Image (tube, helix red, strand yellow):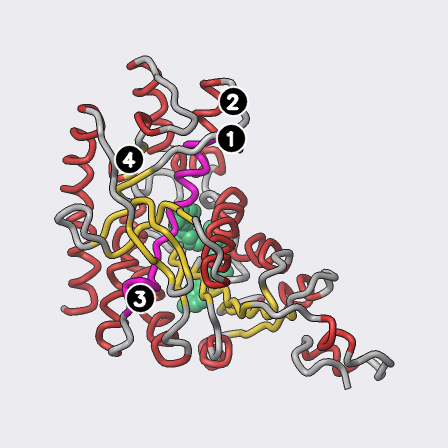
Amino acid sequence: RPHPASHPQVEDVPLLRGSNCRAKGAAPGFKVAILGAAGGIGQPLALLMKMNPLVSVLHLYDVVNTPGVTADISHMNTGAVVRGFLGQPQLENALTGMDLVIIPAGVPRKPGMTRDDLFNINAGIVRTLCEGIAKCCPNAIVNVISNPVNSTVPIAAEVFKKAGTYDPKRLLGVTTLDVVRANTFVGEVLGLDPREVNVPVIGGHAGITILPLLSQVNPSCSFTSEEVKYLTSRIQNGGTEVVEAKAGAGSATLSMAYAAAKFADACLRGLRGDGGIAECSYVASQVTELPFFASKVQLGRGGIEEILPLGPLNEFERAGLEKAKKELGKSIQKGVSFINK
Ligand code: NAI
């Protein structure tokens, strides 16, 4: 028989020799589910995760179109075995046994919308999906992409608390795209290869809550106040730049899939036990008085091993932090009340 984990359509193929080859040759790896896998982010993210050698099983779940996406992705000759799941009745099967669950499900912005305008639809979607996670893979690492991230991560936390499965070390809001953008834009200004640049971005993932720490850029450098203003504004409004350029066809999907795949890979390397992996992420935190905050975290076998200190901020960044905290506090409260109302 074909390898039992292969895509069900393989059942239609006449039996061939070597049906055990995959099982023998397959490297041990992690089981990853993408929820919202047929969407603008989900599809390229599925492609990138199918290319990740740390992934042995890839589950693609959505409420539409997963059979097509799954058939397509499953033909890539990489190690991960791909299975598709369609609609709510298949959610539990999609989640059972997963090590990492990535959530890009939900509606994206159109021009003129803020991320908070998505709350009414996406909050309910994230709640339902997290209820499934609590039931079927309570120990999985969860990467939340669905906006508004500033509220959807607190929503996920409340759902897990209610279910008695909450582990703050395993719940991470994906803010990697802000770092990816910051590295690119800073690289452009300095004339450096963006791969060589590392800009910490703290706070949250919406407008003024996105706080790039330009005083802590690696390699160390200095900026004129004009450059600081330009870079801060461009990083904070990078998402809106894409929404406007797409003119109604959605928000960032390709750069987001790249960022999500990069972050997921860091989480998987952490799970494998690699040392020295630090990424910015929006997590339950005590670095400020707020219950959630994005900053550099160290990843390991249990998810978040340590939340790293913010480091010294200059006056401009301290002022930005105060403004960011005000808005962030409201978004957190909105998420918490959604579950506890
Ligand atoms: P999209 O509309 O192209 O795809 C969303 C997918 O979610 C669709 O395939 C849809 O069928 C699916 N979906 C809807 N309800 C679902 C449910 N109950 N269960 C499972 N799947 C469901 O949207 P796109 O562009 O992929 O964006 C997805 C989300 O990611 C949006 O909320 C967007 O705002 C957010 N986003 C987050 C970023 C970040 O940096 N964290 C950056 C860019 C977008």
4 and 3 marks in contact (CB < 8 Å) = no
Q: Main secondary structure of the magenta part?
A: helix
SS category of the residue bearing label 4: strand
Q: Is 183 placed above or below 254 here?
A: above
Q: Which residue is mark 4?
A: 211
Report crowding for label 1: few under 14, some 14 to 19, many 20 or more residues within 10 A (C-alpha).
few
Residue at the front extreme?
275
The quarter of the displayed image where residue 142 is located = bottom left
Tell me where residue 148 appears, x and y as whole percent: 31, 51
The quarter of the displayed image where residue 16 is located = bottom right
Numbered tag placed on residue 196 in the rendering: 1
Mark 4 or mark 2, which is nearer to you?
Answer: 2
Sooner in the amino-acid sequence: mark 1 or mark 3: 3
From the Cβ of disc 3, is ligand 1 less than 8 Å away? Answer: yes
Range of the magenta residues? 167-183
| Residue 95 forms part of the magenta stretch | no
Q: Is residue 128 left or right of residue 89?
A: left
Tell me where residue 140 appears, x and y as whole percent: 41, 70
Residue 268 seen in the figure: yes
Calculate the distance from the C-alpha at mark 2 to the C-alpha at mark 1. Answer: 7 Å
Tell me which amino acid carries mark 1.
Glu
**Looking at this view, is 123 or 159 the one in front?**
159
Q: Which residue is mark 2?
A: 192
Calculate the distance from the C-alpha at mark 2 to the C-alpha at mark 3. Answer: 42 Å
2 and 1 marks in contact (CB < 8 Å) = yes
